[in-house]
Image: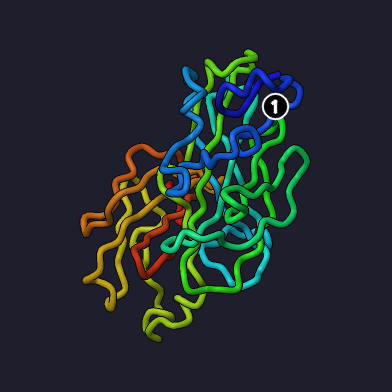
Amino acid sequence: MKYIGCGILFFLFCLGNSNGPGTVQRRDRTGSPIAINSTCSNCHFGGNFDADLSISIWKDSTVVDQFEANEEYLIKVLFDHNGEGRQYGFQLVALTEESLVNAGTFTEVPEYIRKLNLYNDQYTYVEHTRPLDDSVWYIGWQAPEDVSEKIAFYAAGIVTNDNANTSGDEVVWLRTPHLLSPSSLVSSLKPEIKENGVFRIVNNPANDFLQVELNTFLKNQKFDYAIYHLSGKELAKGHLTSSGIALGNWIKGSYVLTIYNNSFVSSQLFVVQ
C-alpha cells in the first residue's frame, strides 16, 4: 500500500489509512492561487510514467463548457500514463475565476473520496482517503447561483509505483485551470454570434492542420485554443492565428477544439482522417 499525501506526518499514519494533503497537512496542493501554486511535488518525486491529469465537466452524458445556475454536473477526473503506474491520488477545488471564492457545491462523492473544508472553512475540496486503484473518478458538483463569473477548476494528483514511500512517484496537475463559463454569456451575445457561433472549422474532417474562421464580429479579438481527446485529456494548446493549427501526424479519430478569451469560450468537435 502506498502513502499518498505530503509531509513528514507520513510516519504518523499507517499505510493502510493513507490520506490526502488536506487531511494530513490541512493545505491546498492543487496548484491554485490559494495554494500559492504549490502541488504535491513538495514531497513526492522521482517517478516517470509519462503521466497526465485532466478533468472534464459532464451533463447528461455530454461534455459541457458552460453552466446554468444551480444545475448539477459530473466532474470526470482522469489519469493517463504509460501503464506502469500502480495507484493514484488527487485533490480538487472549484473557485470563481477572478474573486477566488468557493464556487458551487460538491455533491455526491464515491467511496475513498472525501469532501473537506480548509482555511477557516472558506474553501471546500475533494481528495482521496486512501490510495486509489482506478484511474478515472466522477465527482458530483452543483453550480452556484451566482453566474457573474467563470468557474476555474484546479487539480493536482500523483501516479505512484506503490513502493511504500514518496519516492518514485510522478506528480501531475492542471497547468492551466479548467474553465466553465456562465451560460448567460451566450444568451447575451449579439444575435449574429448566437446564430452563427463564435467560430467554425473550415476543413472538417482535417488532416495535418485545422483552419479556424472566427465570426465576423469577433475577428479583431485575440483567442487562445486547446484541443482535447474525448476522454478529456488536453493534447495541445496555444494562441489562435490566421495560419491555422498544425496537427502533425495525429491518430485518426474525433477530438474537441475549444477557443477562448476573457469574454468567450466555445467548443466544436472535429475529426482527423
Location of residue 69 with respect to 80 vertically, above or below: below
Instruction: Give the residue type at disc 1.
Output: Ser
- Residue situated in front as seen by the camera: 135 or 92: 92
User: Residue 39: where, in percent of width, then height?
Assistant: 48, 35
In which quarter of the view is residue 104 placed? bottom right
At 36% from the left and 37% from the top, the residue drawn is 249
Answer yes or no: is residue 183 visible.
Answer: yes
Residue 214 placement (x, y as % from top left): 30, 69
Is residue 11 placed above or below 102 in the rendered structure?
above
Whether residue 195 is visible to the viewer of this picture, yes or no, is: no
Residue 12 position within the rendered picture, expressed as x and y whole percent measured from the top left: 68, 21
Depth order, front residue of 266/90? 90
Q: Secondary structure at mark 1?
A: loop
Q: Is 61 positioned to the left or the right of 54 in the image?
A: right
Q: Residue at x 56, y 19 (%)?
A: 166
- Is 212 drawn above or below residue 137 in the view shown? below
Colouring style: rainbow
| Picture coordinates of residue 206, whole percent (x, y) | 37, 51
Quarter in which the N terminus is drawn: top right
Task: Kindly identify which residue carries mark 1.
Answer: 18
Q: Residue at x 47, y 28 (%)?
A: 41
Q: Is residue 127 left or right of residue 30?
A: right
Residue 220 lies left or right of residue 187; in this view the side is left
Choose between 14 and 196: the one closer to the eye.
Answer: 14
Residue found at the very far bottom of the displayed protein: 191
Q: Residue furthest top?
A: 163
**Residue at x 68%, y 64% (from the top left corner):** 72
